Amino acid sequence: MRRFKIKARYGLILIVVAIAAAAMLTFPARCIHVSGAELLSIPVADLARGQAQTYCYDDRAGEKIRFVLARDSDGKIHSVFDACRQCYSSHKGYRVVGDAIVCRLCGNRYPINHMMVGKASCMPVELPHQEAAGAVQVKAADLRKGRELF
């Protein structure tokens, strides 16, 4: 009887851990909402070196378009849609884990310094941006071009 209780307890713990892991991979990323008619401006100071952050923009049709801004260890800014060229149809995007982004579908990990180096058919979709006056600027038109990814 005691063995059964121990096995049941371990089984329950295993189920809870599996559910928590699945939830981390399934739920969409939390994002910081940004807005702008034609140009979105995000202060560079909001991103520490070695950090990435997910942002959301609602287009005119009410579609939420997600993107990731990251600042590598050298201070260079990188920007990608929160979607992969291959996995985008799953609508899962990436998780930010330390100084990397991880595809929620296939699990490929992309360090911030090498976000645009794809692995197999999984590859982040680049989002054009500019830096000016201490801010990262993203054109709303460029975000709308990526709408089919969401």
Image (spheres, rainbow, N blue to C red):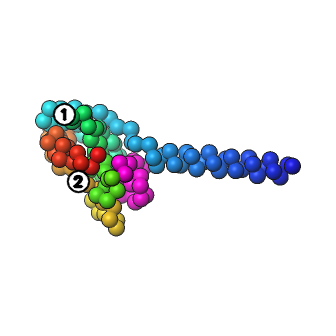
Residue at mark 1: 60
Residue 4 on the magenta segment: no
Q: Give whichever of discs 1 and 2 has the lower sequence position.
A: 1
The answer to whether residue 140 shows anywhere in this view is yes
Question: Residue 120, image x and y in percent?
Answer: 34, 67
Using the image as rendered, state which of residue 16 and residue 41 is in the foreground.
16
In what element is the residue under mark 2? strand
Q: Tag 1: Cα neighbours inside 10 Å, few (<14), some, or many (≥20)?
A: few
The answer to whether residue 41 shows anywhere in this view is no
In what element is the residue under mark 1? loop
Question: Residue 94, image x and y in percent?
Answer: 37, 50
Q: Nearer the viewer, mark 1 or mark 2?
A: 1
The amino acid beneath tag 2 is Glu
Residue at mark 2: 126
Residue located at (33% from left, 61% from top): 122
Residue located at (33% from left, 52% from top): 89
Residue located at (76% from left, 52% from top): 7
Q: Tag 2: Cα neighbours inside 10 Å, few (<14), some, or many (≥20)?
A: some
Q: Quadrant of residue 63?
A: top left
Using the image as rendered, state which of residue 51 and residue 149 is in the foreground.
149
Question: Residue 126, image x and y in percent?
Answer: 23, 54
Query: Mark 1–mark 2 contact, CB under 8 Å?
Result: no
Instruction: Please tell me the numbered disc located at residue 84.
Output: none
Chain part drawn in magenta: 90-112
Question: Residue 99, image x and y in percent?
Answer: 38, 51
Residue located at (38% from left, 48% from top): 92
The amino acid beneath tag 1 is Arg
